[in-house]
Image (spheres, rainbow, N blue to C red):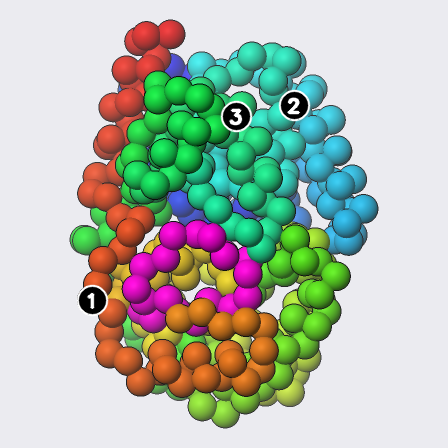
Amino acid sequence: MKIGVLTSSRADYGIYLPLIKKIKDDDYFDLEIIAFGTHLSKSHGYTLSEIEKENYKKTHCISSLISNDDEQGIATSYALTALKFADFWQQNKFDLVFCLGDRFEMCAAVQASIPFNLKFAHFHGGETTLGAIDNIYRHQITLASSLHFSANEIFSKRIIELIGKKDNVFTVGSLSLNGIERYQPIEKTEFYEKFKLYNEDFALITFHPETVNSKMNKQFANEMRKALTHLASKLFLVITMPNADTMGSFFRKEIAQLEDEFSDQVLCIENFGKEYYFSAMYYAKLLIGNTSSGIIEAASFGKYVVNVGDRQKGRLQSDNVINAPFSKQEIIEAFDKALVRECYTGKNNYYNQNSADLIIKQIKQFNEVV
């Protein structure tokens, strides 16, 4: 069975990894990676190098993003991605293609495939993020897909509402948490030395722009910097950089200014990679920002999360999340609440044991039927 894996960013590649590793070792499958989006962007860490280290049988590379990140730039990148994939799908055939999440370039790649009648397996469909235009892209990908692997029963019900049938909709949990109960981080001394973390405690921070309310991003980025300026006096800050989203450059500019002013208290990382990012989450005191990892994964690491703004609004949350608007004072207050709490021991609503094995079983059954 020939499988293609669409990966457009460090985030989706890290989520896929538990499944990719099992498929790579299974003779039933012929695996090919299709890398595009920020993987090929030097300004976003050129994460294609992480893929190339794995020595996959075949890795396709498709460059389609432009550097401008305003509304016109994102629309142009979407159109260019669809154009490039029109040629790619004409020349390359697969029995099934994996697609994940809700990014605009992922949606463009999938939409270009519709005339070719390709079969897609979509991961993390049915979710809601009211503060991001990704909400629209996610549902478009769902409608174009043949197999659906959701992270929670609530999301499966929404997928069924969207596609109008129950066939091929499976609740498997978040793939990124596969095997998390056996997780072992990189040894602490090695991790701290690699990233020159001289302070014992740190906050792990990731902020992305709000793409629905894009005109407010300059103000949001400013409020973020003012809040983090205050927090840097209390705790060391490890900041991972934003994705390629509308107005993401505003956040990058403010983060760069923060690092310049507090170089002894702030460390910026363009791309950790999944292994180091999970280790950073394991060792962090808490998480701050508006990234999906705070909603989906942090609970399994026993971490409290200050979730800022509306980017993740509408997404199912576990009890480790403390919400705050893009306001300096309210971010600080939420931080103070999270800082004094002990390790979170409650449920993670996105966890399901053996997700990768459940997915492989359904893929094989699907292939036998079609």
First of labels 2, 3 by sequence position: 2
Disc 2: which residue: 112
Decide if residue 155 is on the left or right side of residue 326: left
Circle number at residue 26: none
Q: Can residue 52 be seen in this view?
A: no
Name the residue: 63% across, 60% down: 209
On the rendered image, what quadrant is the C terminus found in? top left
Decide if residue 351 is on the left or right side of residue 134: left
Name the residue: 75% across, 33% down: 79
Looking at the picture, how far across and down is residue 124, in whole percent? 42, 40
How many numbered marks appear? 3
Circle number at residue 345: 1
Q: Is residue 308 above or below residue 200?
A: above
On the rendered image, what quadrant is the N terminus found in? top left
- Single out the residue that lies furthest toward the right: 72
| Magenta stretch: helix, strand or loop mostly | loop
Looking at the picture, how far across and down is residue 318, in whole percent? 32, 59
Circle number at residue 143: 3
Numbered range of the magenta stretch = 303-321
- SS of the residue under disc 3: helix
First of labels 3, 1 by sequence position: 3
Q: Which amino acid does label 2 sit on?
A: Ala
Q: Which amino acid does label 3 sit on?
A: Leu
Looking at the picture, how far across and down is residue 303, in whole percent? 31, 69
Q: Which of 355 and 127 is in front in this view?
A: 127
